[in-house]
């Protein structure tokens, strides 16, 4: 029996924990601790512990599939490539669109955006960051010039006051939750703001149980109290920022007094005052947030508000301070960094700047798509559904919009309008079912590559076993397909490392990285512009990334969500995840140990709301919004605020996204997953 341990990086959340894959007789059979990895120091959450279980699932895709007469039939790679190349060549520029993936490697995301722009000549390339942290990229880039988490994960433990808002960290990023506990053990105050009392909220010193969608009102009230009490950092504001007076004018309005904001948010005024005092006076306060903040029509406003508070209190650029925007999927940071976004090439180099386009054309040795912003995921789906024929061909890698996107009936209508669709994935997903060609891909354990965690740490995947059957690494598929399209010269790579070397050449923030440097367990955090640069765990130490080095305050008024409760739909619905499942369940639902714990979805209802509806715990109910309805089991619990209901979105049999609203933030184009109006109905006879 041959055994080996292969150090690699977890394929689930954006924390980027390291572990060893245990390999027996060339097959991955388990996970074991990697103690020297500084991110998690050998600890893992349940998902990490069982990250091997889906790898050898019996229903992995193993052969290319072509749909004939409505049924998939197995095909050779050559047959599949020929068909795809022939079809792809038919469509001109913007008639095609590509969706990259927050789950695959940096190298593969880089190649997909290159394939879209250089081979298909389309500006339409995006991915699901649009659905989770587009508001972070836009909001923090607007305030600081860089749209990423400002601190390292370990640094959270140094904080004296943590405002944890819109993130159930203990369930979604458990190994970041560990740093919250470390800070608390050292005496830090933890303020938790969320409509639910989650496991994260249970360890907090103060829970602000506010209505979903009232974040800006809460933030503005905090700032009013900070200014009234003189807790602002005058020196920081004067030396390192601009436009402070514009924010002051807004937040000092009566609208944002604790009494008024208590009415808007449903949080007692005294608790808001206490929280503002703890935060404003600690001298070392950090904000942790996730999709509870970003997935709103005011997502960018919410994010910019966190920036306003941190600039006002001077809580940036030092240990224990900053803004920790916790990225959801393992490589959503990397997919953004690699330019799998409609508006930027890798390293956030704008597609509308002619010099950037010229730079890419020179590097890639060919003409590329017009230098214009392409369709985002959300706008693409709308176009497919509402303007049939405008986009005829869609190429999707490792995404499952048929479960992850808002208003699923609308998504289905859109995808069914596509003339030719290719899906590249490891399993037959709900989206792949609609494709014309399905290509079998290798998973994280079957290829080399890198992924970039929420703290901008670029870490390695190392191949532990061969892919099943004829499945191939996504990067190999792009190279072979490009050859069939006549672009062999642009895709000559023999290894993931060769692709990474090209990324480093064209991407300034990755410029000093190489596979040799990333071998160390601590890897490197970007920006790392030169080969002798040590990487940058804390951003904005001396100055911000804007050309003048100053941070920009943005005055923001509170606006309610796009859809608010009324007599027909009297409750607010919000969605999220649980610790045992992941995203659309494609991987975790194939893990026996994870699936056993939470095998189906539920709707959390406050006991007072349940009583009014005559609904008992565990009873099946009907949840109805303007977009559709589902049947789902009720979980009656005091942990959810009265007037609000919560559903996890992992489960296809009770898909929460049938109900969610696809109203978009006007600048980030992120949908409002976190607030819509819903009616819960008792099912007769249930
Ligand atoms: Fe994996 Fe995230 Fe759990 Fe770490 S915290 S083991 S990265 S799922």
Image (tube, rainbow, N blue to C red):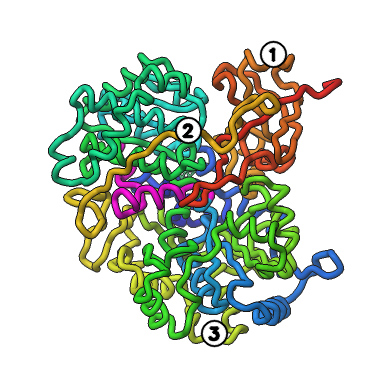
In the picture, which quadrant includes the N terminus? bottom right
Residue that mark 1 sits on: 612
- Contact between labelled residues 2 and 1, with CB atoms less than 8 Å apart: no
Examine the structure image and report whether residue 313 is included in the region drawn in magenta: no
Q: Residues within 10 Å of mark 3 (few under 14, many from 20)?
A: some
What's the residue at 45%, 24% (across, down)? 201
- Contact between labelled residues 1 and 3, with CB atoms less than 8 Å apart: no
Q: Measured along the vertical axis of the image, is residue 172 above or below residue 221?
A: below
Residue that mark 2 sits on: 168
Mark number, residue 487: 3
Q: Is residue 41 visible?
A: no
Position in image of residue 459 (x %, y %): 39, 57
Residues in magenta, as a range: 131-156
Examine the structure image and report whether residue 148 is included in the region drawn in magenta: yes
Q: CA distance from mark 3 to mark 1?
A: 64 Å
Q: Measured along the vertical axis of the image, is residue 413 above or below residue 237?
A: below
Position in image of residue 639 (x %, y %): 54, 20
Q: Is residue 91 visible?
A: yes
Q: Nearer the viewer, residue 509 or 137?
A: 137
């Amino acid at each position: 029996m041959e055994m080996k341990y292969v150090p690699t990086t977890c394929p689930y959340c954006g924390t980027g924990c390291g572990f060893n894959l245990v390999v027996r007789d060339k097959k991955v059979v388990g996970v074991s601790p990697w103690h020297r990895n500084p991110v998690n120091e050998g600890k893992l959450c349940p998902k990490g512990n069982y990250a091997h279980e889906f790898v050898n699932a019996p229903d992995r895709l193993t052969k290319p599939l072509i749909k004939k007469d409505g049924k998939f039939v197995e095909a050779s790679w050559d047959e599949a490539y020929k068909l795809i190349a022939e079809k792809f060549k038919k469509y001109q520029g913007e008639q095609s669109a590509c969706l990259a993936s927050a789950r695959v490697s940096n190298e593969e995301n880089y190649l997909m955006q290159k394939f879209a722009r250089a081979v298909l000549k389309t500006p339409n390339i995006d991915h699901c960051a649009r659905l989770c942290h587009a508001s972070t990229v836009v909001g923090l880039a607007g305030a600081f010039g860089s749209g990423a988490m400002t601190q390292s994960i370990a640094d959270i433990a140094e904080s004296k006051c943590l405002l944890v808002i819109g993130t159930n960290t203990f369930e979604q990023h458990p190994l970041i939750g560990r740093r919250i506990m470390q800070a608390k053990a050292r005496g830090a105050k933890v303020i938790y703001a969320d409509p639910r009392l989650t496991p994260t909220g249970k360890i907090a010193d103060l829970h602000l149980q506010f209505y979903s969608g009232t974040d800006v009102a809460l933030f503005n009230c905090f700032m009013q109290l900070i200014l009234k009490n003189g807790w602002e950092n005058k020196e920081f504001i004067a030396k390192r920022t601009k436009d402070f007076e514009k924010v002051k004018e807004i937040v000092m309005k009566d609208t944002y007094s604790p009494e008024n904001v208590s009415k808007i948010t449903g949080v007692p005024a005294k608790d808001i005052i206490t929280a503002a005092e703890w935060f404003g006076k600690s001298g070392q306060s950090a904000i942790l947030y996730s999709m509870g903040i970003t997935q709103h029509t005011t997502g960018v406003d919410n994010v910019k508000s966190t920036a306003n508070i941190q600039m006002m209190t001077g809580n940036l650029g030092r240990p224990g301070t900053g803004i920790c925007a916790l990225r959801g999927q393992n490589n959503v940071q990397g997919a953004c960094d690699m330019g799998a976004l409609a508006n930027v090439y890798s390293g956030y180099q704008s597609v509308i700047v002619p010099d950037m386009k010229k730079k890419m054309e020179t590097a890639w040795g060919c003409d590329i798509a017009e230098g214009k912003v392409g369709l985002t995921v959300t706008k693409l789906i709308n176009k497919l559904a509402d303007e049939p024929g405008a986009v005829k061909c869609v190429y999707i890698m490792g995404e499952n919009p048929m479960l992850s996107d808002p208003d699923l009936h609308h998504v289905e209508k859109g995808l069914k309008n596509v003339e030719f669709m290719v899906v590249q994935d490891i399993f037959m997903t709900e989206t792949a079912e609609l494709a014309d060609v399905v290509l079998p891909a290798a998973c994280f354990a079957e290829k080399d590559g890198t992924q970039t965690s929420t703290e901008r740490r670029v870490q390695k995947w190392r191949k532990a076993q061969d892919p099943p059957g004829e499945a191939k690494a996504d990067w190999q598929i792009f190279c072979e397909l490009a050859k069939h399209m006549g672009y062999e010269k642009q895709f000559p790579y023999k290894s993931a490392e060769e692709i990474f070397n090209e990324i480093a050449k064209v991407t300034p923030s990755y410029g000093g990285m190489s596979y040799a440097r990333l071998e160390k367990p601590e890897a490197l955090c970007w920006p790392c512009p030169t080969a002798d640069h040590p990487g940058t765990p804390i951003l904005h130490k001396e100055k911000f990334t804007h050309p003048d080095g100053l941070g920009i305050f943005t005055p923001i008024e509170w606006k309610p969500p796009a859809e608010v409760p009324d007599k027909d739909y009297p409750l607010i619905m919000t969605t999220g995840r649980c610790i045992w499942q992941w995203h659309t369940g494609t991987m975790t639902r194939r893990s026996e140990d994870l699936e056993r714990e939470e095998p189906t979805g539920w709707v959390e209802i406050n006991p007072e709301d349940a009583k009014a509806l005559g609904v008992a715990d565990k009873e099946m109910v009907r949840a109805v919004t303007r977009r559709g309805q589902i049947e789902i089991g009720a979980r009656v619990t005091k942990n959810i605020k009265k007037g609000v209901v919560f559903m996890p979105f992992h489960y296809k049999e009770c898909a929460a996204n049938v109900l969610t609203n696809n109203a978009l933030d006007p600048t980030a184009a992120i949908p409002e997953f976190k607030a819509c109006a819903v009616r819960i109905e008792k099912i007769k006879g249930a």
